[in-house]
Image (cartoon, helix red, strand yellow):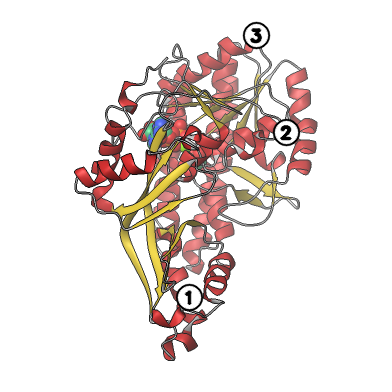
Amino acid sequence: MKFGGTSVGDATCIRRSAEIVANASREHSLAVVVSAMSGVTNRLIDAAHQAKRGDRDAGKTLAEALHRQHFEALAMLVSNEKSRMQVQHRIEEILGEGSRLYEGTALLRELTPRTLDSISSLGERLCAPVVSAALCDMGVASSAVEATELIVTDSFHGGAEPQADATRQRSHARIGPILNAGQVPVVTGFIGATADGVLTTLGRGGSDYSATILGAALDAEEIIIWTDVEGVLTADPRLVSEARTIAEISYREAAELAYFGAKVLHPKTLRPVLPAGIPVWIRNSFAPEKLGTKITQHGRSIGGGVKALTAIRDVALISVGGPGIVGVPDVVGRTFSTTAQLRAEVLLISQSSSQNDICFIVAKAHAQATLEALHREFAQDLAHQVVEHITMDPNIAIVAVVGENMRGTPGVAGRTFHALGREGVNIIAIAQGSSETNISFVVSDQSVKPALLATHREFGLGKLTSN
Ligand code: ADP
Ligand code: ASP
Ligand code: MG
């Protein structure tokens, strides 16, 4: 079971989540993964950037606030004084480490990806002992475990990749005895460590990924991701108020949604469970009586083919073009080896038929670096006007229409674009992979909401029955 930031946001939420664990632990052997209390990771990262600019107080002020926040939650959750003092001591140790990291950053005015990982991991490290102590207080034997002892990754800070075999070995060795002793381990989400023990993170929102990495490593029967909505919805409920919970969805569909920005799942969440076919549930910790969404190998088909919509906003469109690139065979190759070198993930590619313009989309965070690297790569070509322009548009978004049964269902694209046309939404670029599990298109950022509303209505997604 994984509990996200809002599910452990304060003492009341932690108690509610702990009750879910307590109930389940009567019938099952289970391991828990927790995120940082909500908002903590953002605050840690903001303070790190302030420290980098030479601000010596930002880290100190935050450490004091986090001290207060975690002590307060602990006081409400744990009545046993001895166990409360143990956790208080642990919180102080972790914050002491944090303060030294902030001091070093402010002193050097340098923030390496490795240091940023250590700083942003503090939230999960502070939260796990509190949740574990709350469980003990309810009579559920539990111990807190740092995922640096379990999840072995490569050294790509800020988005490390797990190594399945080593992770399996360590997880069994460390978690096996805890489970055998009838205890519930509470593991920090979001983090791992390289084989030689250097802390890494799996990327923002990565606790979902931690849960499936660990679930797969421990051969779990199922994985439940507890969050603040009743499962995977037909669209982001913040943008489309008529969005409904989908009872069952396939790995493929859920992965497409996550990839194209549905924040409810980290994009890599489903990778570890594919080989063993472990079902993943998305459920609401604020309404545990609801069943939520079940993500399985095949999902369950519904009429019409379209399952859900999503949009991804923090992205930029980059185009490389000019009539001169016609017939230059390596422009595409050089463009994408440049993005690969930067590890800038390309979310969508479109090329016009006269070959004189290639456009693609990367996360906004990678856009400037990508643009600069392309200018360097094509410096000669720009000078000789083989390539005429390399431009970037940051005011765009991708909207994706997702559903495995769209494959072979004629008319989905027609209906999508007809609905958009009716609403006056201008389409900048379009892509549909041959898998036909999604149609994605690029619109201006201010058209995202009308585009979602129009397509949601067109495919009657608000009328789906939820469970
Ligand atoms: P957690 O802290 O539990 O990991 P997140 O905030 O990361 O939770 O993800 C849950 C949020 O994802 C929801 O509150 C919702 O606003 C957003 N969301 C976006 N798209 C969807 C969708 N299709 N279905 C459900 N939630 C979505
Ligand atoms: N706390 C981390 C973040 O905010 C990981 C997570 O919540 O999944 O990105
Ligand atoms: Mg999340």
Placement of 27 over or under 75, stated as above or below:
above
Residue sitting nearer the eye, 7 or 136: 7
How would you rate the neighbour count of disc 3 (Cα within 10 Å): few for under 14, some for 14-19, many for 20 or more? Answer: few
The spot of residue 114 in percent (x, y) is: 59, 58
Mark whose residue sits in front, 1 or 3 = 1
The spot of residue 368 in percent (x, y) is: 41, 68
Compared across the picture, whether 145 is left or right of 280 comes to right
Quadrant of the rendering where the C terminus is positioned = top left
Which residue position holds label 1? Answer: 374
The spot of residue 393 in percent (x, y) is: 33, 65
The answer to whether the beta carbon of the residue marked 3 is less than 8 Å from any atom of ligand 1 is no
- Mark 1: amino acid: Leu
Residue 389 quadrant: bottom left
Compared across the picture, whether 364 is left or right of 334 comes to left
How would you rate the neighbour count of disc 1 (Cα within 10 Å): few for under 14, some for 14-19, many for 20 or more? Answer: many
Look at 78% across and 42% down and name the residue there. Answer: 165
User: Which badge, 2 or 1, is on the more N-terminal residue?
Assistant: 2
- Mark 2: amino acid: Ala
Which residue position holds label 2? Answer: 217
Look at 52% across and 15% down and name the residue there. Answer: 20
Q: Is residue 69 visible?
A: no
User: Which badge, 1 or 3, is on the more N-terminal residue?
Assistant: 3
- Mark 3: amino acid: Glu
Q: Which mark is residue 27?
A: 3
